[in-house]
Amino acid sequence: MPKFVREKRNIVPVIGDGAIGVPDFADGRLIPVLIVDCAAHQPLEDLIIAHKDTPPGDVTTVWSWKLWSKKEVFLTFYFLRPVETSATIAFDVSTKGGLVDWIINVRGLYLQPLTSGTKVSEGFGKPKILVEVSPKTTFPSWKDIYSRSLEKLYHRRGLSKKQAKSATKDHIARTREIQFRRQPKVISEDD
């Protein structure tokens, strides 16, 4: 996985997150939604709005982290069409590690600009884009980074190292069960 210096001007703040689950899309899995503030990164908002009236464009995604620290991981998007731009999302592993794990496992996410609403429910019918995060983008050390972060959290909360390891395994299993829950297809009387 590349470790490189990101330009701070390309880091887009995440204001909120949520999920969308549609029975006929992505096998009914819940897809994470990141609500991003594009005020300082207008080309990203332009791209999201342009996607409404154009076919999907090309995007490459790259995960990275700072050279000497794995407390934060970064997901950088390189968009080629319909607007050429790049943007980076920063994730604090101790607070947003579950979200990173979710994105990696479902291989995608929605980007919703703040102008489409501060909550996912406010953004229905408003501009947002679905971005595929290719399995090739996944970095091999993620499982260890996430597990160590959770173990430290549980240890700080008073569990022994052995209990923290067990709690971490349970935590990851429970969250993945929720992440991969599929929305049932509704069968109408006409079917």
Image (cartoon, rainbow, N blue to C red):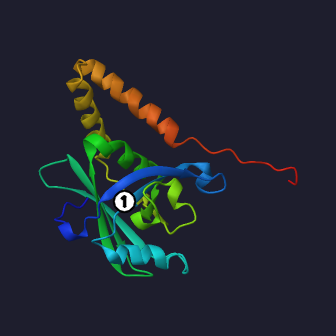
Asked whether, in this view, residue 186 is left or right of residue 76, the answer is right
**In-front residue for pair 83/4:** 83
Which quarter of the rendering shows the N terminus? bottom left
Q: Which residue is drawn at 42% across and 67% down?
A: 115
Q: Residues within 10 Å of mark 1 (few under 14, many from 20)?
A: some
Q: Residue at x 19, y 60 (%)?
A: 3
Q: Name the residue under label 1.
A: 137
The x and y percentages for residue 4 are 18, 64
The x and y percentages for residue 69 are 15, 48
Quadrant in the rendering for residue 136: bottom left
Q: What number of labels is visible?
A: 1
**In-front residue for pair 123/189:** 123
Most extreme residue toward the left, as rendered?
68
Q: Which amino acid does label 1 sit on?
A: Thr
Element class at badge 1: helix
Q: Residue at x 45, y 58 (%)?
A: 109
Quadrant in the rendering for residue 149: top left
The x and y percentages for residue 84 are 36, 81
The x and y percentages for residue 110 are 46, 60
| Vertical relation: 161 (above or below) 145 | above
Q: Residue at x 27, y 44 (%)?
A: 93
Asked whether, in this view, residue 168 is left or right of residue 102, the answer is left
| Vertical relation: 106 (above or below) 37 | above
